[in-house]
Image: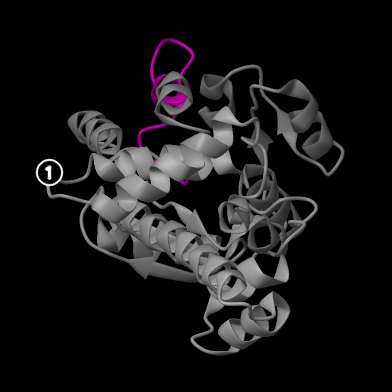
Amino acid sequence: MGSGIAANFLKHGHAVTVWNRSPARARALAKQGALVAAAPREAAAKADAVFEVTANDESSRAAWLGEEGILAGAGPRAALVTCATLSAAWTDELARSCATEGRTFLDMPMTGGRVAAESGKLTLLAGGDETALAGLRPLLAAIAGEVKYFGPAGSGMRYKLILNTLQAIHIAGFGEALRLARAAGLDERLVGAALAERPGGVITQLTWKDYPNGPAPINFAVEWIAKDLAYAAGVADALHPLLDLALAEYRKKIADGEAQADWTAIAKD
């Protein structure tokens, strides 16, 4: 996802400096015109806007904090953006750290998957200062087809966790429907195609299109939706039995060696 963002900024003529924990991925962007930094601090040093896209809270924290982190290198006027999907707790902590230093911070997790990232048609789910977001919109047009605003810092992240929860439960429900169809003696192909038409919707259609073999390359890995569901469970103390059931199923996939399978794999059992 981060590579897609960087590539689209380059395509639109922006000067881009990248850093990646996996040097080979950074080198691929260098061939497209990006400068490669040795650390997040160096990547952020001359940037007007800094975009962080890492895997989880731990990698995000390492990218932002410390002597070689983004906050140590970014200029006081730079817009600081996380596009990763992180926990609400870490997002709030990061927002407070930026506010203490008088920095502009926005949480802007992405949706749309690998294809949208590569085509520059992401939907960004934003939280933070609305005036600051307005100033960034011309830049964001290089990577996103739509930017949705949800409120103060942390709001975009909370919405992303809610969205992924609903989508994961929906995929699990679609799999349940197909198992019921088989048990009832119906033709699974006819049932799946009909459900993709009605109730339809993007997630139903995506799951059916990739059933039963999965997309190549994958859109979103089992291990990452499991991470997101675990973060979502921490958003509120309210009971969330459907979330818990979906998370348990995804964790079972991981235990079965399918961490790198597409997240629609949950529908196949």
Where residue 67 sits: x, y (%)? 43, 10
Q: Report the front residue among 59 and 234.
A: 234
Residue 50 visible, this orientation: no
In this rendering, position of residue 128 left or right of residue 226: left
Residue found at x 69% / y 80%: 187
In this rendering, position of residue 42 left or right of residue 236: right
Q: Report the front residue among 115 and 152.
A: 115
Q: Residues within 10 Å of mark 1 (few under 14, many from 20)?
A: few
Vertical placement of residue 10 versus 140, above or below: above
Determine which quarter of the picture holds residue 57: top left
In this rendering, position of residue 33 left or right of residue 258: right
Q: Is residue 244 magenta?
A: no
Which residues make up the magenta segment? 63-85
Q: Report the front residue among 257 and 153.
A: 257
Residue at which label 1 appears: 237
Residue found at x 46% / y 40%: 226
Where residue 13 sits: x, y (%)? 72, 56
SS label for mark 1: loop
Q: Report the front residue among 53 and 264.
A: 264
Residue found at x 57% / y 70%: 183
Query: Which residue occupies the extreme top position in the image?
Result: 67
**Could you tell me the amino acid type at mark 1?**
Asp
Where residue 55 sits: x, y (%)? 52, 33
Residue found at x 71% / y 64%: 211
Residue 90 visible, this orientation: yes
Query: Which residue occupies the extreme right position in the image?
Result: 31
Vertical placement of residue 43 versus 62, above or below: below
